[in-house]
Image: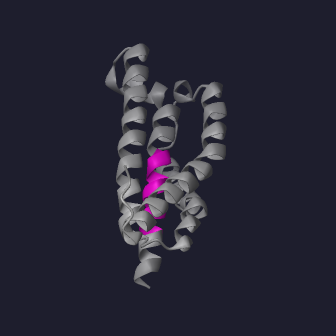
């Protein structure tokens, strides 16, 4: 049961790691309107935040997966389990913060970027799990990685 909770927490973190950049991309016009900043400033800030979230999330989840998943192959389920959490959080955000102003509609290119992110994200999760678990296996065997 404890391992089940760990897999779900890691899956939830993966969902948050893609949810925040997607929501930032989709709500760029809304952030411009609400903050009063220029569109270029908001887009630069969003780009910086997306890169920072992906880098910090990758490092954090690499170590968390290595520690919590204990070298079990069942951790690969996180490549699938992140999606229901993503849908749940997206539904909650859309329900509580609906787009009521037509000028806040996202750019059509954001949809293409999101499709690309959704296609590649499961592979990213699998690679991160593989790297984390293979490193953990080498440490268990006493092999020193250099």
Above-or-below relation of 100 to 91: above
Residue 109 visible? yes
Give the residue displayed 57% in from the left and 29% down from the top: 106
The x and y percentages for residue 11 are 48, 62
Residue 92 visible? no
The x and y percentages for residue 33 are 40, 23
The x and y percentages for residue 77 are 58, 67
Q: Provide the residue span drawn in magenta.
A: 8-19
Give the residue displayed 43% in from the left and 59% down from the top: 135
Residue 112 position by quadrant? top right
Q: Quadrant of the N terminus?
A: bottom left
Above-or-below relation of 111 to 143: above
> Left or right: 44 with respect to 100?
left
Residue 102 position by quadrant? top right
Number of numbered tags placed on the structure image: 0
Magenta span main SS: helix
| 61 or 34, nearer to the observer | 61
Above-or-below relation of 3 to 134: below
Q: In the rendered structure, does residue 17 fall within the stretch colored magenta?
A: yes
């Amino acid at each position: 049961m404890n391992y089940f909770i760990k897999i779900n927490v890691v899956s939830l973190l993966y969902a948050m790691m893609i949810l925040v950049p997607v929501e930032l991309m989709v709500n760029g016009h809304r952030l411009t309107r609400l903050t009063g900043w220029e569109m270029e400033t908001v887009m630069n800030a969003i780009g910086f935040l997306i890169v920072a979230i992906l880098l910090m999330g990758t490092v954090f989840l690499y170590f968390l997966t290595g520690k919590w998943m204990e070298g079990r192959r069942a951790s690969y389920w996180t490549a699938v389990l992140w999606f229901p959490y993503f849908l749940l959080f997206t539904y909650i955000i859309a329900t509580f913060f609906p787009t009521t102003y037509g000028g806040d509609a996202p750019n059509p290119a954001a949809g293409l970027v999101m499709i690309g992110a959704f296609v590649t994200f499961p592979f990213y999760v699998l690679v991160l799990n593989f790297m984390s678990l293979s490193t953990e296996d080498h440490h268990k065997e006493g092999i020193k990685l250099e």
